[in-house]
Amino acid sequence: MRNLMIKEMKLSASVLSYLFTLFGLMFFLPGYPILCGVFFVTLGIFQSFQNARETNDILFSALLPIAKRDVVKGKYLFVCFIELCGLLMMGIAVIIRMTVLSEAALYRNNALMNANCFSLGLAFLIFGLFNDVFVGGFFKTAYKFGSPFVTYIVLSFLTIGIGEMLHHFPGLESLNAFGTEHLILQISLLVSGIVIYILLTYISCRRSCRRFERIDL
């Protein structure tokens, strides 16, 4: 798998996949729906899938002396690697905003979602949706990805919209906590997002392996 991962990173990947991880730093932006940064990270990954399709990368990988399911696992490993790089950027922004900038008026007066553990948990959720809906949808045919990506766009922005609205409802203000306020709740929500991400990715990967083995390339 190590060699396959190297192949994904050096041959299959679009440079945009790496550059777009920097959109994770959008978590620093006040007055802007910060979870859009998650979408832009996945848009970079989408470019790699587009590049792979145009260069017949899937067929090339399937002709290598490896199991067909390893081709799928290699793609998922690459996707998760890029997502984790983006999450690292988001995590850095969250830590800084929860500590050094926790009392900054620029963020305190922001009506939109605050960068905290809850928003980071939602980022994990959206990445999980991407892995399940888009990557899993791609491996239905190992060629078509337009429809799965459109479906993912709808679900991701629906999630972003709900996330932005929740803290405005009475009793849910703690979701938009600053600094170490409601820390136990915040950490619980982050852990929940991580668990959902792992489950969605694992289930999607197993399903994609079965589908890809049945495809006649």
Image: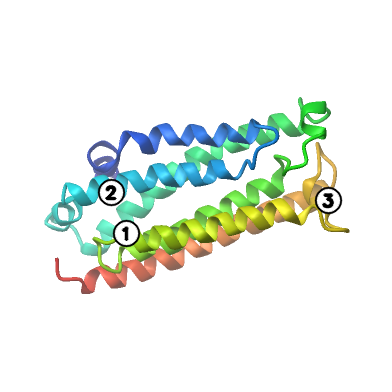
Q: At numbered mark 2, what does the secondary structure look like: helix, strand or loop?
A: helix
**Mark nearer the N terminus (1 vs 3):** 1
- Between 23 and 188, the residue placed more toward the observer is 23
Amino acid at the residue labelled 1: Phe
Q: Give yes or no for contact between labels 1 and 3 (Cβ–Cβ under 8 Å).
A: no
Q: Which of label 1 and label 3 is nearer to you?
A: 1
Disc ID at residue 145: 1
Q: Is residue 155 left or right of residue 148?
A: right
Expressed as whole percent of the image width and height from the top left, the position of residue 110 reads 77, 36
Expressed as whole percent of the image width and height from the top left, the position of residue 101 reads 76, 27
Q: CA distance from mark 1 to mark 3?
A: 38 Å
- Vertical comparison of 135 with 38: above or below: below
Give me the residue at 48% from left, 56% from top: 153
Amino acid at the residue labelled 3: Ser
Expressed as whole percent of the image width and height from the top left, the position of residue 132 reads 45, 63
Expressed as whole percent of the image width and height from the top left, the position of residue 165 reads 73, 54
Q: At numbered mark 1, what does the secondary structure look like: helix, strand or loop?
A: loop
Q: Give yes or no for contact between labels 2 and 1 (Cβ–Cβ under 8 Å).
A: yes
- Check the picture and name the quadrant holding the C terminus: bottom left
Residue for badge 3:
174
Residue for badge 2:
50
